[in-house]
Image (cartoon, rainbow, N blue to C red):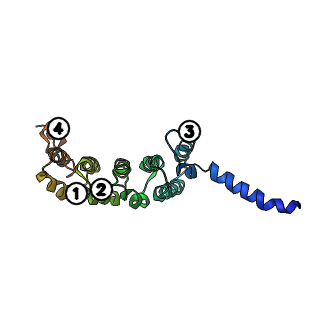
Amino acid sequence: MKPRSLFPLLALLAIAQTSVADPYHQLLTYDWAQSRRPLAAIERQIREAKGPEDLRAIEQKLITVLSNPKATYAGKQFACRMLRRCGSEACVPALARFLTDPKLSHMARFALQGNPSPQAGQALRAALSKVPDKLKLGMLSSLAARREAAAVPDIAALLTSENSEVVAAALNALGTDPRHGPARAGACTGREGHPT
């Protein structure tokens, strides 16, 4: 075998090694029973990011994982968790697609709740009318946590729900749940009440 014929083989091996070592590639097939090494590597990258440019690069890789139909549930769940920490407006569409997913809705909502982009709030509002009652409870909680004043009409519409839990969650989000007292008032309206 001529020496130069080894170069293509070595190039293929280098590509294969890079793929195996890439934590985002490993995240596509990750399962909870496997080593957390790739997860720890991604967490470390976020911690050690030197600025917005580094975080946007990480965010894009996580979006790629979420957008891959072959990615595992565990991999997508972890990607959502990390986007809670480094996500921007760019990841909102990818997360919004999972708000109606029975398995990933909670993690996608968790990521959007802490996202500073106004589009994140819009995505939660849009999903509120589409998800079943058991998922509405979390949506209401997240909208209240974000103080989404624009969501008040959507939330108020749920006060006529036949589900008492949904009604209670809507009251709480609007800041009118008597269990929380006047100091809780105005969650979504942005107005805090004060004890007299």
Mark 3 nearby-residue class (10 Å; few <14, some 14–19, many ≥20)? few
Q: What's under tag 1, amino acid-wise?
A: Ala
Rendered position, 1 above or below 168:
below
Task: Indicate the amino acid at tag 2.
Answer: Leu
Circle 4 residue:
180
Dot 1 crowding, Cα within 10 Å, few <14, some 14–19, many 20+: many
110 and 9: which one is in front?
9
Q: Quadrant of the N terminus?
A: bottom right
Contact, mark 2 vs mark 1 (Cβ under 8 Å): yes
- Mark drawn on residue 182: none
Amino acid marked by disc 3: Ser
Q: Which residue is mark 3?
A: 35
Q: Secondary structure at mark 1?
A: helix
Relative height, residue 21 to residue 68 (above, below): above
Does dot 2 land on a helix, a strand or a loop? Answer: helix
- Marks 3,1: beta carbons within 8 A: no
**C-alpha distance separating marks 2 and 1:** 9 Å
From the viewer's perspective, is the residue at label 3 or at label 1 nearer?
3
Element type at mark 4: helix
Query: First in sequence: mark 2 or mark 3?
Result: 3
Label 2 sits on residue = 124
Relative to the observer, which residue lies in front, 87 or 193? Answer: 87
Measured Cα–Cα span from mark 4 to mark 1: 20 Å
**Category of crowding for the residue at label 2, using alpha-carbon neighbours closer than 10 angstroms: few (below 14), some (14–19), many (at least 20):** many
- Residue 82 position within the rendered picture, expressed as x and y whole percent measured from the top left: 46, 48
Q: Is residue 57 left or right of residue 102?
A: right
Which percent across, then down, holds residue 17? 68, 51
Judged by depth in the image, the label closer to the viewer, 2 or 4, is 2
Q: Residue tagged by mark 1?
A: 151
- Please, what secondary structure does the residue beneath circle 3 have? loop
Quadrant in the rendering for residue 180: top left
